[in-house]
Image (tube, rainbow, N blue to C red):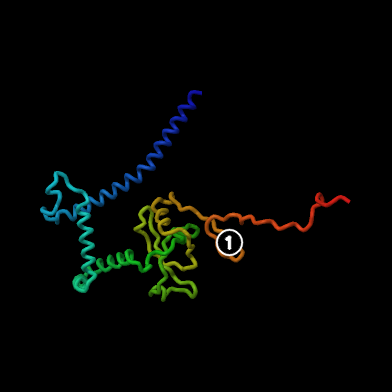
């Protein structure tokens, strides 16, 4: 009899600890990453700031984030100057100069194309999440499906009515690394989850899965998304025939 309250109390304490850990752990990790990023930027930018303009010279303690603010201002200023004719001419001259360097031109060109694709609004990002059978039949891997484009690979390997599509299969738990594969369109099982939900699923190693919305199909074959409820009850039509109990006695 005396063990039950103790067990119940320990269980509650354990639940309280786990609840607090679930609340505090993401906040602590986010704060650590943000603080590390600010310190990393400050370590790169602050040494190039003249002492007369640095608040660390006049204060007895360093000001975290000042280097990050200066970096943001400089990047915005460079973008403003690049938008005019003189700035584009200077950038073009610098790119032509880098294009003559054998090793640097390949790295710069690849990085520039990646950043232009990621930060632009051209719709060239991954558009959908899918599944492909990899590394063997019966085993499915999550992939990000790119937009369909006509490339040399498509010209040489496409089948009639079944084109090849570029898919990126990320690795767990780091979705920035993975494999680029060209898969037949018929071999890809497209999913309804968003790219963000797919990334969360990969980073969490399958622990954080998006909620599944049940889809119903009407008689016309059109899908119905969301919750499906019974049709509203309307007024009942008047009965034409009376029941045996309501008939008058003869």
Helix, strand or loop at disc 1? Answer: strand
Q: Is residue 68 above or below residue 5?
A: below
Instruction: Say which residue appears at 37% left-offset and 52% top-offset.
Output: 173
Residue 21 in the figure: left or right of residue 246: left
Q: Is 108 on the left or on the right of 5, as rendered?
A: left
Most extreme residue toward the right is 250
Q: Position of residue 81 (x, y in %)?
A: 21, 68
Q: Is residue 18 left or right of residue 186?
A: left
Q: Position of residue 111 (x, y in %)?
A: 28, 65
Q: Identify which residue is drawn at 44% across, 33% down.
A: 12
Q: Position of residue 245 (x, y in %)?
A: 81, 49
Q: Which residue is mark 1?
A: 217
The quadrant holding residue 72 is bottom left
Say if 124 sits above or below 39 in the image.
Answer: below
Mark 1: few/some/many CA within 10 Å (<14, 14-19, 20+): few
Q: Residue furthest left?
A: 52
How far across and down, in percent of the image, does residue 83 sit? 24, 70
- In-front residue for pair 112/79: 79
């Amino acid at each position: 009899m005396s063990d039950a309250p103790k067990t119940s109390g320990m269980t509650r304490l354990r639940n309280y600890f786990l609840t607090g850990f679930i609340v505090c752990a993401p906040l602590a990790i986010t704060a650590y990453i943000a603080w590390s990023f600010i310190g990393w930027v400050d370590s790169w930018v602050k040494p190039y700031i003249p002492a007369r303009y640095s608040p660390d010279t006049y204060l007895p303690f360093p000001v975290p984030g000042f280097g990050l603010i200066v970096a943001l201002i400089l990047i915005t200023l460079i973008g403003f100057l690049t938008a005019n004719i003189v700035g584009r001419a200077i950038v073009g001259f610098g790119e032509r100069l880098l294009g003559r360097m054998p090793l640097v031109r390949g790295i710069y060109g690849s990085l520039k194309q990646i950043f232009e694709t990621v930060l632009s609004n051209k719709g060239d990002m991954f558009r959908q999440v899918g599944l492909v059978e990899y590394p063997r039949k019966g085993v499915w891997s999550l992939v990000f499906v790119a937009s369909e484009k006509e490339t040399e690979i498509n010209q040489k390997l496409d089948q009639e009515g079944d084109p090849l599509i570029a898919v990126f299969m990320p690795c767990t738990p780091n979705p920035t690394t993975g494999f680029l594969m060209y898969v037949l369109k018929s071999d890809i099982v497209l999913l309804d989850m968003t790219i963000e939900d797919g990334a969360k699923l990969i980073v969490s190693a399958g622990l954080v899965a998006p909620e599944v919305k049940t889809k119903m199909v009407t008689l016309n074959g059109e899908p119905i998304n969301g919750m499906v409820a019974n049709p509203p009850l309307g007024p009942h039509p008047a009965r034409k025939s009376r029941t045996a109990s309501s008939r008058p006695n003869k």
